[in-house]
Image (tube, grey):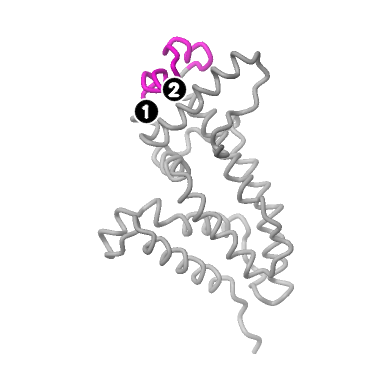
């Protein structure tokens, strides 16, 4: 079972939980394939084998259903990114592992790309106090990114003036660039980013570029 197949934890009778699970799995598929604007609750209901009215019984609107799915997806993504003993790795290897995990997430789960693009298109309207995305991301930065950067600064591998939050935002979007802007980049620079070879080239470029940006200046 994919980690995206699990709905948020809900304390409900077994039958209700099963119904919610089917609705959330169907909604995730619909939002992943079409994005928020084009997704239709009729399609979700048909895939979940429920009525549209029943969806509205559990969720007040498409926005609310999207928020629940987005929150579940976000928590899964942060959990997977954090599920590595980065502290046991040399700093450069830890950053390389982080970049590879971001690329692999986009390869294995198209929903990561779709939801990221959706939030850009909708000016992050689904990231608010009702979702856990922001606090989870901040916690990841403080507990994972900051220690890696501090470790690298102590060993002399990294500069000591890197802002952890800005660094993570840069790493995520640079590593994911060939997914977020793949078709446009393919047409512009002539590299097929829909192919394994194109993704491999982008992965290697992202690692080299990010590590180079961290490199400490030689002592004079």
* Residue 215 is inside the magenta segment: no
Residue at x-position 57% and y-position 39%? 3
Per the image, the residue denoted by label 2 is 62
Per the image, the residue denoted by label 1 is 39
Residue at x-position 39% and y-position 40%? 121
Which image quadrant for residue 99?
bottom right
Q: Dot 1, crowdedness within 10 Å: few (<14), some or many (≥20)?
A: some
Question: Considering only vertical position in the picture, is 184 above or below 18?
Answer: below
Which image quadrant for residue 188?
bottom left
| Lower position in the chain sequence, tag 1 or tag 2 | 1
Question: Considering only vertical position in the picture, is 8 above or below 147?
Answer: above
The reply to whether discs 1 and 2 touch (Cβ–Cβ < 8 Å) is: yes
Residue 28: horizontal and vertical position, in percent? 47, 31
Q: What secondary structure predominates along the stretch shown in magenta?
A: helix
Residue 82 is tagged as none
Magenta-colored span:
39-60
């Amino acid at each position: 079972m994919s980690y995206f197949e699990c709905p948020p934890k809900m304390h409900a009778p077994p039958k209700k939980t099963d119904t919610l699970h089917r609705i959330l799995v169907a909604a995730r598929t619909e939002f992943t394939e079409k994005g928020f604007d084009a997704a239709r609750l009729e399609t979700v209901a048909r895939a979940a084998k429920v009525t549209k009215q029943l969806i509205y019984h559990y969720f007040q609107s498409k926005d609310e259903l999207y928020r629940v799915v987005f929150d579940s997806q976000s928590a899964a993504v942060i959990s997977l990114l954090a599920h590595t003993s980065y502290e046991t790795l040399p700093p450069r290897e830890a950053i390389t592992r982080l970049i590879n995990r971001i690329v692999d997430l986009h390869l294995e789960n198209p929903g990561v790309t779709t939801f990221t693009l959706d939030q850009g298109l909708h000016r992050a309207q689904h990231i608010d106090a009702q979702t856990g995305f922001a606090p989870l991301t901040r916690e990841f930065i403080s507990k994972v990114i900051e220690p890696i950067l501090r470790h690298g600064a102590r060993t002399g591998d990294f500069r000591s003036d890197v802002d952890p939050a800005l660094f993570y935002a840069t790493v995520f979007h640079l590593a994911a660039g060939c997914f977020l802007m793949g078709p446009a980049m393919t047409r512009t620079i002539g590299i097929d980013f829909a192919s394994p070879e194109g993704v491999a080239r982008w992965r290697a470029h992202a690692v080299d570029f990010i590590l180079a940006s961290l490199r400490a200046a030689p002592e004079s």
